[in-house]
Image (spheres, coloured by chain):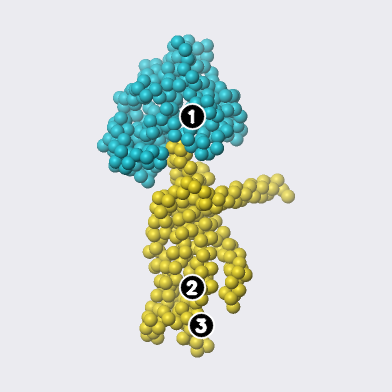
Amino acid sequence: MPGFVRTVVVSRLASGGRAMIFAGRALREIFRPPFEFQETARQVYELGWRSLPLIAAAGYAVGIVMSMHTRASLERFGAEALVPAVLALALVRETGPLVVGLLVSGRVGAGVGAELGAMKVTEQIDALEAVAVDSFKFLVVTRVVACMIAMPILTAVMNITGIIGGWTAESAVSGMPFETYFRTAFSLVQFTDYVPGTLKTMVFGFIIAVTASYLGVHTSGGTQGVGYAATRSVVTASILMIAANVVLVRLIFFIFPETAE
Amino acid sequence: MTEPPAAIRLDRVSKAFGSFRVLDDVSLRIPRGRATVVLGRSGTGKSVTLRHIVGLLQPDAGRVFVDDVEITALSPSALAEVRQRIGFLFQNAALFDSITVAENVAFPMRRHTTLSDGEVRARALEKLAAVGLARAAESMPGSLSGGMRKRAGLARAMALDPAILLVDEPSAGLDPVTSEEIDDLLVALKHQRGTTLVVVTHNIPSARRIADTMVFLHEGRVLASGTAADLERCEHELVRKFMQSEAGG
């Protein structure tokens, strides 16, 4: 192996190893006192509550588009009556969690990466340490916990607004009443469809917050470095989340075999 | 006169960043309740020395003691306890830019005291008044001038009435009058509260006002130490030139 390739590979592996240690520490510190309740609540507001308009709007639009596509497909088989149920199932099992993950990865990943990156280059993280505050707990763990709390809630919002969007599209075509649509939509959705899909978003939240925090607190190179941290946070978190989704879906099928049917 | 016990000791500390050796076998003794000014050209390890004292950097070799406790061997929680006794003014102030100036000063008190909200606020305003910034209490750090940020940083460093105050370039960005006021404030802290001061500066008039002892760092080593008069008579020409070059202000 040429020397420079070897150097790059070793450097990437070392970086990956450091990131894994960082993630492990974040996971461990979640359960160890002191717990930064106030700062965590603030982060739930910043990362979760302030993402609500984006998620609700996106969910509504996704619901409309999915409804149109689903209807077009089911019409071929004369199964238009199944449009609400198919849409709800697709949203709850996969589309909702994944779209929320990607949206949050974009909004929160960039925000956390840039915020912590800026704090790093302006020595604010050192200043926290200097006033005897554990910066890892205060900055990283609070964001990780907040993201893990916010993601399932945002996914529920995405699912509901998606179904409302689906009804909007369906009612425009068939004039179906909302109550009928809603009842039909949830006729096929079981507990085992809803819970694993929603809970896996907690893993997405962990991945997004840890990735963005890691890249943020390891920022160097001034304002350009902050920009890199923000961009890399979004890209890396999105890729990791999509890769994790493959594993999680397999895991859900294994734990809840009925969801694979 | 007997020398007071050491508040801070650096014992053969070395530190390198990559191949650049910033501190090379540096040993220092900072007496309790005295003001020690660290002088030297840019990039000679003055700020790095302060960062070692507060545990923001770990030496590659050597040990750092604060009140006879070796901080280089402490757990994070034990180090946090030591840090509560140390105030640190960063070179660029490093104010938290998402909260107001008053909240910056209040932050350490909210974290480490059981004072009520009102008491914290009153004390924060008192600290800001001491550095002449009472009217900027509700401003955001981003709207302050460099000198004002520096003073706000000093107020935050004083928030917990620390026994040790580390001050990196207190005069940078300040007009001569304000600079002198800050120097007077530091000297008053030393006399009234017995605060141990470690001040990094390039400003020789300021150093003369503050210092009981001066330490001159050069290329990561202690080139000279003693009183201002000792450094003026120092055998090293660089130290004499440094002391003379800005003697007039």
- Pointer 1 local density, CA inside 10 Å: few below 14, some 14–19, many at least 20: many
Q: Is residue A230 visible?
A: no
Badge 3 amino acid: Ser
Mark 2–mark 1 Cα distance, whole angstroms, equals: 56 Å
Neighbour class for label 3 at 10 Å: few (<14), some, many (≥20)? some
Left or right side of A186 for B106: left
Q: Report the amino acid beneath label 2.
A: Leu
Of B31 and B143, the residue lying toward us: B31
In this figure, which residue is indicated by the disc labeled 2? A91
Q: Nearer the viewer, residue A35 or B231?
A: A35
Other residues around mark 2 within 10 Å, as few (<14) / some (14–19) / many (≥20) = many
- Distance from disc 1 to disc 3, alpha carbons, whole Å, reads 69 Å
Q: Are marks 2 and 1 in contact (CB under 8 Å)?
A: no
Are dots 3 and 2 on a single chain? yes
Residue drawn at (53%, 28%) of the image: B69
Label drawn at residue A73: 3
